[in-house]
């Protein structure tokens, strides 16, 4: 059969926000699931797809490989792709994960990876969309709107974003939100609270036991992950906050570390060490990394000259010659908790709201 462009019921656009291979994967999947291509139909070869769509062979190679893994097609080298009978499609449904552009790349990647593994084991197709901001500050919803047209069985938004929550609510899909704030919009069937402030009582109790009085909470100018200052002041501690800059030309993560490094070095140069409190509390792990380097360069002894408490993510640090006292998020454990809740929903069992909190761990930097 000589395939023509008009025989292909979908197109790919280079100007679209998502990759050509994903566009082809989604278009071909929809054509098969909708019945446009039926069981037993022989589809074009990789080279023919490349010609028909005007793309490099890597695009159809990736798309065909993905749909073969999903059980929708069988690939026969030199012959083309054959559409499988629907009974060979192992997927029971579809779960969509929505991740906003932000600072928590490592945490989100590990978290979503655990959910993907569990959902796949349950027999459900997994899709992920990263929603990016445009230069004007507004979110680009093109790819998300495209994914929502397929009406996933469940959609999970990782981190609160009111604009995205409103879009999900209007789409009519069942969705849940993992973040600090509760979503009460129609369609939201579950809230998974990310409660980083849960460790604050442990911080206060530790300060009381250790006898520290002067505490400086260090965060980045765009905000930290928890806030211990109000509670510390409530219990009579001398607690202040210092916001260090983010050098965005280096990106969010490295920019936060470099900004803290520069701010600490500048302050040491101007004020010496007299400004150091009894305890430094870092509410961002990248800020802590930069500040710790500056203190090593200055020869500050920890915990002799100053005690240190930091936010941390399991598996990524911050790294220091001694163990840090820390408010630690474990994305593997958190991902397993979220995956279990989602699995309950898609299997028809009742899904409860889940509270996810970090662990307070005492190390050598604040014994």
Image (cartoon, helix red, strand yellow):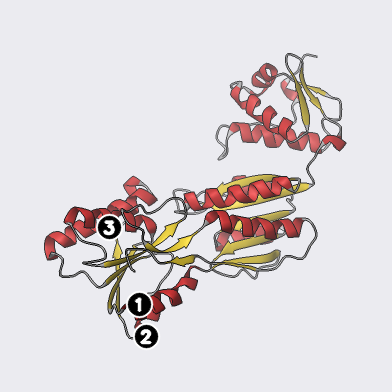
Task: State the CA–CA distance, disc 2 to disc 1.
Answer: 10 Å
Q: Mark 3 points at which residue?
A: 291
Q: Element at badge 1?
A: helix
Mark 3 neighbour class, 10 Å CA radius: few under 14, some 14 to 19, many 20 or more: many
Task: State the CA–CA distance, disc 1 to disc 3.
Answer: 21 Å
Residue 367 or 19: which is nearer the viewer? Answer: 367
Which numbered disc, 2 or 1, marks the residue closer to the eye?
1
The spot of residue 240 in percent (x, y) is 29, 75
Q: Quadrant of the C terminus?
A: bottom left
Q: Name the residue under label 2.
A: 235
Rendering quarter of residue 57: top right
Q: Quadrant of the N terminus?
A: top right
State the count of labels: 3
Mark 1 neighbour class, 10 Å CA radius: few under 14, some 14 to 19, many 20 or more: some
Q: Residue at x 32, y 46 (%)?
A: 249
Rendering quarter of residue 239: bottom left
Q: CB atoms at circles 2 and 3 under 8 Å apart?
A: no
Locate residue 38 relative to residue 78 in the image: left or right.
right
Q: In this view, does 132 lie above or below 291?
A: above
The spot of residue 158 in percent (x, y) is 57, 57
Q: Is residue 50 visible?
A: yes
Locate residue 268 relative to residue 158 in the image: left or right.
left
Q: Residue at x 49, y 72 (%)?
A: 198
Instruction: Give the mark, 1 or 3, whose residue is nearer the N terminus.
Output: 1
Residue 361 or 67: which is nearer the viewer? Answer: 361
Q: Element at badge 2?
A: loop
Q: Is residue 13 visible?
A: no
Residue 207 is marked as 1
């Amino acid at each position: 059969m000589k395939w023509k462009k008009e025989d292909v019921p979908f197109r790919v656009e280079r100007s679209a926000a998502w990759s050509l291979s994903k566009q082809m994967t989604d278009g071909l999947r929809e054509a098969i699931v909708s019945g446009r291509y039926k069981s037993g139909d022989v589809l074009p070869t990789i080279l023919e797809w490349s010609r028909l769509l005007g793309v490099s062979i890597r695009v159809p190679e990736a798309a065909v490989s993905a749909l073969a893994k999903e059980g929708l097609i069988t690939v026969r080298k030199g012959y083309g792709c054959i559409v499988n009978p629907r009974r060979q499609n192992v997927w029971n449904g579809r779960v969509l994960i929505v991740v906003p552009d932000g600072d928590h790349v490592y945490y989100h990647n590990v978290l979503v990876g655990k959910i993907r593994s569990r959902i796949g084991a349950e027999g459900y197709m997994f899709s992920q969309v990263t929603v990016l901001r445009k230069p004007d500050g507004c979110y680009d919803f093109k790819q998300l709107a495209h994914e929502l047209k397929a009406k996933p069985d469940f959609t999970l938004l990782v981190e609160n974003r009111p604009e995205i929550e409103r879009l999900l609510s209007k789409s009519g899909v069942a969705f849940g939100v993992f973040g600090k704030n509760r979503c009460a919009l129609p369609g939201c069937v579950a809230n998974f609270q990310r409660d980083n402030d849960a460790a604050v009582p442990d911080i206060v109790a530790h300060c009381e036991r250790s006898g520290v009085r002067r505490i400086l909470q260090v965060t980045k100018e765009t905000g930290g992950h928890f806030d211990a200052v109000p509670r510390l002041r409530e219990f009579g501690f001398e607690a202040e906050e210092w916001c260090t800059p983010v050098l965005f030309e280096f990106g969010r993560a490295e920019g936060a570390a470099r900004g803290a490094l520069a701010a600490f070095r500048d302050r040491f140069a101007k004020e010496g060490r007299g400004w150091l409190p009894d305890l430094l509390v870092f509410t961002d792990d990248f800020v802590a990394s930069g500040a710790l380097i500056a203190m090593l360069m200055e020869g500050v002894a920890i915990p002799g000259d100053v005690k240190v408490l930091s936010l941390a993510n399991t598996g990524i640090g911050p790294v220091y010659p001694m163990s840090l006292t820390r408010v630690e998020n474990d994305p593997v454990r958190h991902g397993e908790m979220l995956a279990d809740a989602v699995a309950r929903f898609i299997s028809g069992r009742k899904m409860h709201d889940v509270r996810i909190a970090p662990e307070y761990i005492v190390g050598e930097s604040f014994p």
